[in-house]
Image: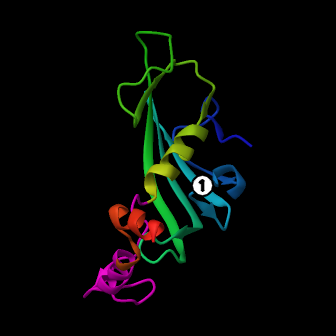
């Protein structure tokens, strides 16, 4: 199902559109959504542009980079795309900015599919670890220094590893 919005028939006021992205469509090897992603697009059409304010929300699971346990996360983010009617040139699709797109005045439909998918992935944290408060992980409630120390103790220097094998 594509997230297409017919802007040609819109009146000059706010219109809400609701879409659902199946969790299977956005799951990857490193990310697993536990719910479908809800997309609410509030479209405001004015004389020379279409402004789309988008909210995306859903639940996902991630592996904590610190303790390697599975944690739950919530995605609830907003972003905006502005489509400006380009009266000088009838070619559409060229961009000067990720948030501003130029379209031909006779454009019937805009597809926000790729923009929503891209925003989902850039909205998720690169570091998959809960916040720390006073040296304690807010997810697993373990002392962060102890977790890091355990990892260091389990690491074997490659030089020693060769000697241990020859024993």
**Where residue 71 appears, x then y in whole percent?**
53, 76
Depth check: give the residue in front, 19 or 73. 73
Residue 116 falls inside the magenta stretch: no
**Where residue 96 appears, x then y in whole percent?**
35, 25
Residue located at (45% from left, 86% from top): 140
Q: Is residue 60 left or right of residue 134?
A: right
Q: Quadrant of the C terminus?
A: bottom left
**Where residue 23 appears, x then y in whole percent?**
68, 58
Report whether residue 118 is seen: yes
Report whether residue 112 is seen: no
Residue located at (33% from left, 86% from top): 146
Instruction: Rate crowding at label 1 as few (under 14), some (14 to 19) or many (20 or more) other CA atoms within 10 Å.
Output: many
Residue located at (69% from left, 50% from top): 25
Residue range (magenta): 125-152
Residue located at (58% from left, 18% from top): 106
- Write down the quadrant of residue 155 in the picture: bottom left
**Where residue 152 appears, x then y in whole percent?**
34, 75
- Judge whether 9 appears above or below 161 on screen: above
| Residue where numbered disc 1 is placed | 39
Furthest residue in direction front, as rendered:
167
- Write down the quadrant of residue 160 in the picture: bottom left
Furthest residue in direction right, as rendered:
1
- Judge whether 101 appears above or below 140 on screen: above
- Write down the quadrant of residue 35 in the picture: bottom right
**Element at badge 1?**
strand
Depth check: give the residue in front, 40 or 98. 98
Q: Quadrant of the N terminus?
A: top right
- The image's colour scheme reads rainbow
**Total residue callouts:** 1
Depth check: give the residue in front, 18 or 151. 151
Q: Is residue 156 left or right of residue 25?
A: left
């Amino acid at each position: 199902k594509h997230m297409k919005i017919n802007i040609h028939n819109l009146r000059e006021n706010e219109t809400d559109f609701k879409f659902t992205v199946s969790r299977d469509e956005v799951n990857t090897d490193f990310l697993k959504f536990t719910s479908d992603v809800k997309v609410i697009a509030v479209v405001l059409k004015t004389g020379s542009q279409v402004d789309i304010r988008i909210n995306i929300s859903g639940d996902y699971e991630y592996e904590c980079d610190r303790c390697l346990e599975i944690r739950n996360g919530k995605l609830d983010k907003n972003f905006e795309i502005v489509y400006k009617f380009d009266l000088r040139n009838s070619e559409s699709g060229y961009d000067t900015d990720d948030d501003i797109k130029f379209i031909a005045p006779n454009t019937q439909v805009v597809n926000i599919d790729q923009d929503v998918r891209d925003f989902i992935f850039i909205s998720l944290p690169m570091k998959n670890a809960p916040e720390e408060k006073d040296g304690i992980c807010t997810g697993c409630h373990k002392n962060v220094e102890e977790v890091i120390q355990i990892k260091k103790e389990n690491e074997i220097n490659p030089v020693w590893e060769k000697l241990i094998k020859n024993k």
